[in-house]
Amino acid sequence: MTAAKSPDALSPAEALKREAAARALDYVRSGMKLGLGTGSTAKHFVDLLAQRVAQGLEVVGVPTSEATRAQAESLGVPLATLDEHPVLDLVIDGADEIGPDFSLIKGGGGALLREKIVATAAQQMIVIADASKKVARLGTFPLPIEVVDFGVAAIRRSIDKAARAAGCQGLLTLRRRPDGHVFVTDQGHLILDAAYLSISDPATLAARLSEVPGVVEHGLFINLASRVILAGADGVTVLDR
Ligand code: 5RP
């Protein structure tokens, strides 16, 4: 793994993510069992956490993806599995959109299933993001829906029906990797990205999608985050629910 860039070399957008990640460290205490999120913002957090660990902070991390596991391992952050620690003190993770009541769209990095399992196992979820992620209504970012690799055409039809019942309609795109191959999640599933554009009732959509056979999980995180740390041009803001 390449060494993390020094903060001076970061683009303005990356610098904001790092600022949000740095503030999240204020809530980490020695002895904590920590869920470690996935994505570029969570990556900054793991990097900064590793620096504290090197200085003597004693934590154990449960990664939400193989990418985060590899990063944390390479930086010397002690890791455990969720089976070893089924209750976590805190999870720190990024988000693709943060809506009213801290409802979230997650899964842009494809780790939504493990992220949701880990967030549900944690006593507190703190979301770290640059301020552009905060929105008045969810849906501009396509909603990732993780599905099994069987009968995808039929699953799509069922998803469309379920979404329409929740007032949402939009194209479902099978996620591909940059090299054109189908994207496969760490759990061996596929992702359909749903361009709903506007989700007026995230809780109802979440419930409907969860009922579709073949849907393993979706990227709507409802009532999971309790604190959001946003970094913008005017500084870092901590919001509590
Ligand atoms: C990964 C996620 C990420 O938290 C989300 O995509 C945000 O990523 P980034 O910090 O790179 O913007 O849900 O599955």
Image (tube, helix red, strand yellow):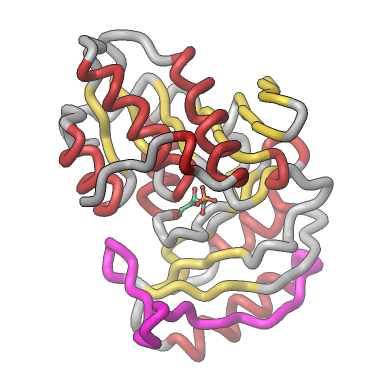
Q: Viewed as shown, does residue 135 lie left or right of 80?
A: right
Q: Nearer the viewer, residue 238 or 16?
A: 16
The stretch in magenta equals: 164-188
Q: Nearer the viewer, residue 77 or 111?
A: 77
Please, what is the dominant secondary structure of the magenta stretch? loop
Q: Viewed as shown, does residue 193 lie left or right of 82?
A: right
Residue 169: x %, y % from top left: 76, 76
Q: Residue at x 39, y 87 (%)?
A: 180
Q: Viewed as shown, does residue 30 lie left or right of 141?
A: left
Residue 121: x %, y % from top left: 38, 32
Q: Residue at x 42, y 37 (%)?
A: 44
Residue 172: x %, y % from top left: 61, 80
Work out whether residue 36 can be spotted.
yes
As for residue 172 lying within the magenta part, the answer is yes
Name the image quarter holding residue 240.
top right
In this view, 215 is above or below 25: below
As for residue 239 lying within the magenta part, the answer is no
Residue 70: x %, y % from top left: 20, 48
Q: Viewed as shown, does residue 27 lie left or right of 169?
A: left
In this view, 110 is above or below 122: below
